[in-house]
Amino acid sequence: MYSHNYRRSQQHHHHQQQQQHKQGPKESPIKCVYIDGLVVLKIIKHCHEEGSSSEAQGVLLGLVFDNVLEVTNCFPFPRSNDDEDNEEAAEYQYTMIRYLKNVNVDHLQVGWYQCSPYGSQLNKIETIDSQYMYQGTIEESIVLLFDPIRAQRGFLSLKAYRLTKAAMNLCKESDFKPETLRQNKMSFEKFFEEIPIIIRNSHLCKALLLEIDEDMPIDAGRQLLDIGGFSVVEKSLQSHIKSVEDLNKQTSTLRNQIIKQHEIARENMNRSLAKMPPMTEDEMAKLLKSFKLTPLQHLENLLNYSQTHNFCQQSSLYSTQNIGKLFMAKALHNNNNNN
């Protein structure tokens, strides 16, 4: 089966390349992601063993067929702290893929996964750099972000993302100036695109799950109304407040930069009326030195907007779930008292 899947993947990739030469590049080659249930369990196990650390990462393996990305296997990255460890990690990755190839297991890299507590890794520059590298090498690559905090509260949070075509072009040019972002109509909502995920299991796995379900005790779902998630809401709001504070600092820096630019323009106008030479580049650079932002800092500002939006969505989701549980628990309590 694995050998057949691999041959089908290679044939499909060759067919895709021929079609792209004829029809030109498509906006997005992936419309949906199918993930084996065993892959999800491997990701959860790895993140749990790493103590829900954001350093937990791994490689996704699978195949592509008809705008659908199938993730059939994965393996974790070893931890790395310096350049030598990075070289060892790369060698480890090549060795693992070679071993999988030798036993006819799908070994086509289709992306990577990242442990993302509270969804904090989506808008990190390191995440964008890694995804740009993967997506630049294999166009269909995705990044899977797993939130272990939500999973501990009984809600599986696994999302697949890709860089948009506009984001790929900006990363290639490394030009994130406000003028460039405005010309490309780029906003924080257009940097990533989320791809729908469907978790699938084999018939044997489904049969096993049905047998396990029959043996489960009747009160196995009593944690349904557990309202212990308020601690998660509190930590999520703390991260949200920090993100807003960083956003406020960045906005103040940009505002001061604009004020200084207006002052320079006004000074040059006054000098022109007085028939004096305008300010030199050195004089202007000296005034703007403390407010000048690098292209990378402009990217950080853009990502901070996206991160704030992400924390807003999470806080809203957590709060809605817990408020709903409170109303349900109150209704059950009143019902019991009446009886």
Image (cartoon, grey):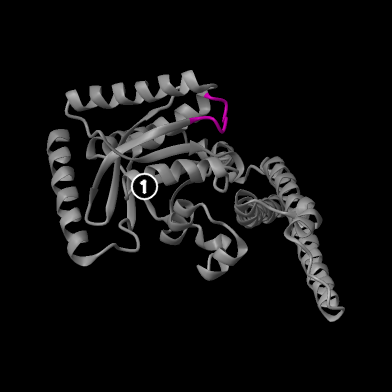
In this rendering, would 204 be left or right of 270?
left
Q: Secondary structure at mark 1?
A: helix
In this rendering, would 327 be left or right of 191?
right
* Residue 305 visible to the viewer: yes
In the rendered structure, which amino acid carries the disc numbered 1?
Gly
What percent of the width, then of the height, locates residue 307?
A: 62, 52
Highlighted magenta segment, given as a residue range: 50-56
Callout 1 crowding tier (Cα within 10 Å): few <14, some 14–19, many ≥20: few
Nearest the eye: 171 or 48 = 171
Q: Is residue 81 magenta?
A: no
Which SS type dominates the magenta stretch?
A: loop
Q: Is residue 52 magenta?
A: yes
Q: Quadrant of residue 212?
A: top left
Residue under numbered circle 1: 136
In this rendering, would 147 be left or right of 35?
right
Going by the picture, which residue comes out furthest to the bottom? Answer: 273
Residue at point 79%, 65% (across, down): 279
Q: Quadrant of residue 45?
A: top left
Nearest the eye: 291 or 100 = 291
